[in-house]
Image (cartoon, rainbow, N blue to C red):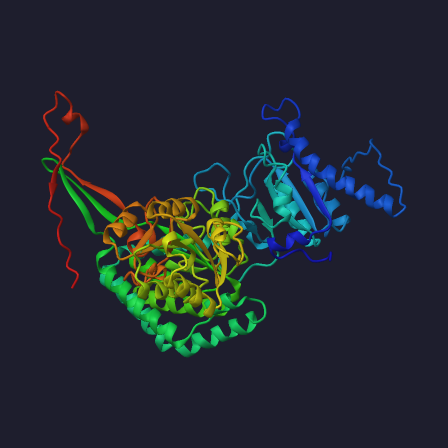
Amino acid sequence: MHGKSFAHRSELKHAKRIVVKLGSAVVTRGDECGLALGRLASIVEQKRRNLNGTLHELLRMNIVPIVNTNDAVVPPAEPNSDLQGVISVKDNDSLAARLAVEMKTDLLIVLSDVEGLFDSPPGSDDAKLIDIFYPGDQQSVTFGTKSRVGMGGMEAKVKAALWALQGGTSVVIANGTHPKVSGHVITDIVEGKKVGTFFSEVKPAGPTVEQQGEMARSGGRLLATLEPEQRAEIIHHLADLLTDQRDEILLANKKDLEEAEGRLAAPLLKRLSLSTSKLNSLAIGLRQIAASSQDSVGRVLRRTRIAKDLELEQVTVPIGVLLVIFESRPDCLPQVAALAIASGNGLLLKGGKEASHSNRILHLLTQEALSIHGVKEAVQLVNTREEVEDLCRLDKMIDLIIPRGSSQLVRNIQKAAKGIPVMGHSEGICHMYVDSEASVDKVTRLVRDSKCEYPAACNALETLLIHRDLLRTPLFDQIIDMLRVEQVKIHAGPKFASYLTFSPSEVKSLRTEYGDLELCIEVVDSVQEAIDHIHKYGSSHTDVIVTENEKTAEFFLQHVDSACVFWNASTRFSDGYRFGLGAEVGISTSRIHARGPVGLEGLLTTKWLLRGQDHVVSDFSEHGSLKYLHESLPIPQRNTN
């Protein structure tokens, strides 16, 4: 293994031999009056467990380890200049580098009292942490002062790190002083998380994700300043490219499908697959988005005359930079890109590696469309080996994260996001309540479409609630017969199971999203009991009532607290395209900002514009000359022709 350093953080998990250098600032207290015992103990405890395992392994091999408590290292008096290929041991940084290379270690971790290497002195306004440092980048770094308690400053650490890197040892410089975190920093680094500065000899061909975030931010701001007609023109051009370049897109998608064969489950392969009809539908959806984009950014929502010559406007503006993480579905890329373009948002896209060929060509076409108005960089596709967890920490670059994929993906992102809001739904546990006054002709069609049309979708039916009066009726028999023909596995809820002489398969949990041809059936005594069941076990996604009684239906529509509530309609209508939004970035079950299928409107926020004439608040005081009017003013109509 040794002889070549790791090229990427993700490879650090393969490190077998590691040297950890603790800087003086890590093991001393902030007042410089002794050891920081708690911090030191948390780090040592981690290493103690490793030592324990090492000693046991040596004993198992009949080797008697001898540990000398008096071991010490004193740097020899060497000249201040280094010989070719040799590093002078003048401080603990150079000592650690020398030891790491001599011991042929895979990784050297240098823990200091700073987060890592910055492009300017830490603490200055413009200082940015350098995620990955390459040997050729030395000229772009400004070094600050030495450590308050140690011998070597950051310059010494960088010099030692580069020497170790040249010797085949990977290096990470990170902060070891954070309370509660210091004991975990070593394992975080080895697990490949974005901690500190990673030294690498291999420079990637493209920009870093941090650079992509900055490009999306600046590109998005330019995009937002375009005229609505110009943003619509970009989207129309992208729609044309989807059909004009159909053969190239399908060829790239074929490569993805061939590579995924045998590795992905059938529902995921279906999501991964593109076709001529899918591309045609995508193009139609994009043109819908283009049409609605005419009245998006800069729309005046309200106007108020605060006082004479002091007028206030509330206008729509983009959210900023969106990070959309999606699995399997490459058709998601142009949909989300079009919505971001229409709403003037910068966009970072992170697709699954199973769709890499498809995503690459679709992104190239998106950038080609953006280029017609000089905003190519507004939409970025993350191709580096960034872990989702690391992307979720970029709170200075990303304003909103939108996950599109499995409920597990959404939960993981919601857990990993630090300081960035997440728009999404953790589960799609959709219910259909069949009322005692339901139409025999409608029920079977609605249940079949909701459950069987696309069972892997988040808006597919998962629990069927049936009024008790319908048991042992022709309508009930029709439902069961249809489900058997469609090969749907039935799970019986506790009440339903008690009515049966046979038990199909008693449900393990009433809060289950099957995502397949499986369905839970439960019995309720009334519409109120159905509502109570939905509120207890549902996920606030999409819930349906089937009934001919309008009063009962309206009661259900008003009382069910879900993002989408339907009467005599399939759950599968819960979709941006079907709602006429053109497409959706996802379905939100949160109650803040957007809810349900999130289209163009959900990607906008507002700002307030106040236009005055030398107005000051003191003019409105008790003894001031002005009074507040707070008059509502008419909103001007925008020309959308």
Q: Quadrant of the N terminus?
A: bottom right
Instruction: Residue 158: give x, y in percent of width and height.
Output: 61, 45
Q: Nearer the viewer, residue 511 or 234?
A: 511
Q: Residue at x 69, y 41 (%)?
A: 20
Q: Nearer the viewer, residue 496 or 138?
A: 496
Q: Residue at x 28, y 67 (%)?
A: 287
Q: Is residue 621 above or below residue 402?
A: above
Instruction: Residue 222: give x, y in percent of width and height.
Output: 31, 56
Q: Residue at x 51, y 44 (%)?
A: 129
Whether residue 376 can be seen here: no
Whether residue 638 can be seen here: yes
Q: Quadrant of the C terminus?
A: bottom left
Q: Residue furthest top?
A: 623
Q: Residue at x 82, y 41 (%)?
A: 55
Q: Is residue 126 left or right of residue 596?
A: right
Q: Nearer the viewer, residue 346 or 480?
A: 480
Q: Based on the displayed image, in which of its 4 quarters is residue 231 positioned?
A: bottom left
Q: How many marks?
A: 0
Instruction: Residue 410: give x, y in percent of width and height.
Output: 47, 52
